[in-house]
């Protein structure tokens, strides 16, 4: 499938400087009061990663982004202080963060759908300091399923989960800033974990546990590795250098090379491991539990 060339998306691309992790949240809610508006900004934020420095905690500095107790929160790793920047409501779902941590892309459900009239969703670009909305962008028809939003490295495409009545279940899709659905992974047989590589390619898993590499036109290149239960891989994240994949599998965080070799479990604690993010040099992980 050829990729349609969309208009540039939300916010100008920014240099990687912060840890960012999108811990899924939100739920279904009542329709919002108005529909999508035109943005005053230029591009989507490029997908964020992390920086490692010697901060006041002597280990790391940077910012961890998450949802907690009804707030979208920026957590300063050096000081250990959380700072809410946006209040969550029942219409708002997952989010993704610009590379320098200055903007969040938040998915919002505007209306619920029916068989005759599909639901409407959009994306808000929000300043992570002030909570001010920087721009709004339409999504393709359908209801957000609550999956994480994943921006392409160039900030031009959004991958997330979407439900339409004719599908009968949630699908993993890629769409652009104009609300065009560019590719449906679930229709192509891939309904498991998915993620972008730094060069714009993607990986996605099918129901049989096969993780497959796709080119930037969403054509299958090769199978990488097959995984077995009791659960299949989830939360797929490529390292900033593109050489390794991080994901949750059977309740634990694992890392392996992009070719499927050197698969190993990262942590062995008894804590519930709820999130993880790469440092920009691909040498370290920040794990939340």
Image (tube, helix red, strand yellow):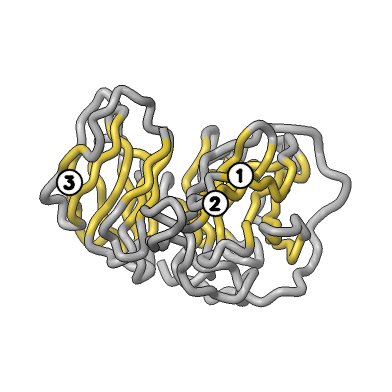
- Residue tagged 3: 225
**Closer to the eye: label 2 or 3:** 2
- Horizontal side of 65 relative to 84 (left or right) equals left
State the CA–CA distance, disc 2 to disc 3: 37 Å
Q: Earlier in the sequence, mark 1 or mark 2?
A: 2
Neighbourhood count class around disc 2 (C-alpha, 10 Å): few under 14, some 14–19, many 20 upward: some
Say if residue 167 shows up in the picture.
Answer: yes
Towards the viewer: 151 or 79: 79
Q: Are marks 1 and 2 in contact (CB under 8 Å)?
A: yes
Q: Which residue shows up at 74% across the image and 65% down it?
A: 135
* First reached walking from the N terminus: tag 2 or tag 3: 2
Q: CA distance from mark 1 to mark 3?
A: 38 Å
Residues packed near mark 3 inside 10 Å, few (<14), some (14 to 19) or many (20 plus): some
Determine the secondary structure under disc 1. Answer: strand
The residue at which mark 2 appears reads as 76
Q: Looking at the picture, how far across and down is residue 176, in whole percent? A: 58, 65
* Left-right relation of 105 to 285: right
Assign a secondary structure to mark 3: strand
Q: How many numbered dots are placed on residues in this image?
A: 3
Q: Does residue 191 show up? A: no
Point out the image quarter for the N terminus.
Answer: bottom left
Q: Residue at x 66, y 77 (%)?
A: 42
In the picture shown, does residue 125 fall above or below 168? below
Residue farthest toward the left in the current orientation of the protein: 261
Q: Can you say whether 225 is above or below 36 in the image?
A: above
What is the quadrant of the C terminus in the image?
A: top left
């Amino acid at each position: 499938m050829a990729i349609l060339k969309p208009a540039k998306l939300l916010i100008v691309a920014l240099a990687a400087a912060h840890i960012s992790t999108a811990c899924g949240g939100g739920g279904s809610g009542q329709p919002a009061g108005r529909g999508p508006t035109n943005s005053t900004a230029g591009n989507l934020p490029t997908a964020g990663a992390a920086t490692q420095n010697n901060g006041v905690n002597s280990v790391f500095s940077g910012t961890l982004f998450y949802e907690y107790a009804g707030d979208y929160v920026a957590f300063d790793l050096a000081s250990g202080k959380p700072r809410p920047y946006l209040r969550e409501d029942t219409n708002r779902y997952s989010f993704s963060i610009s590379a320098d941590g200055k903007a969040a892309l938040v998915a919002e459900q505007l209306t619920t759908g029916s068989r005759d009239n599909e639901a409407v969703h959009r994306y808000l670009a929000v300043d992570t300091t002030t909570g001010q909305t920087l721009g709004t962008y339409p999504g393709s028809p359908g209801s957000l399923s609550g999956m994480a939003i994943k921006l392409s490295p160039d900030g031009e495409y959004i991958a997330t989960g979407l439900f339409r009545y004719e599908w009968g279940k949630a699908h993993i899709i890629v769409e652009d800033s104009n609300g065009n659905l560019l590719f449906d992974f679930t229709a192509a047989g891939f309904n498991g974990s998915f993620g972008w590589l730094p060069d714009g390619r993607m990986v996605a898993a099918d129901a049989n546990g096969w993780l497959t590499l796709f080119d930037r036109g969403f054509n299958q290149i090769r199978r990488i590795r097959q995984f077995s239960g009791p659960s299949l891989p989830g939360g797929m994240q490529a390292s900033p250098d593109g050489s390794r994949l991080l994901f949750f599998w059977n309740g634990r965080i694992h890392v392996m090379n992009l070719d499927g070799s050197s698969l190993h479990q990262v942590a062995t604690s008894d804590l519930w491991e709820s999130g993880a993010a790469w440092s920009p040099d691909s040498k370290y992980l920040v794990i939340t539990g």
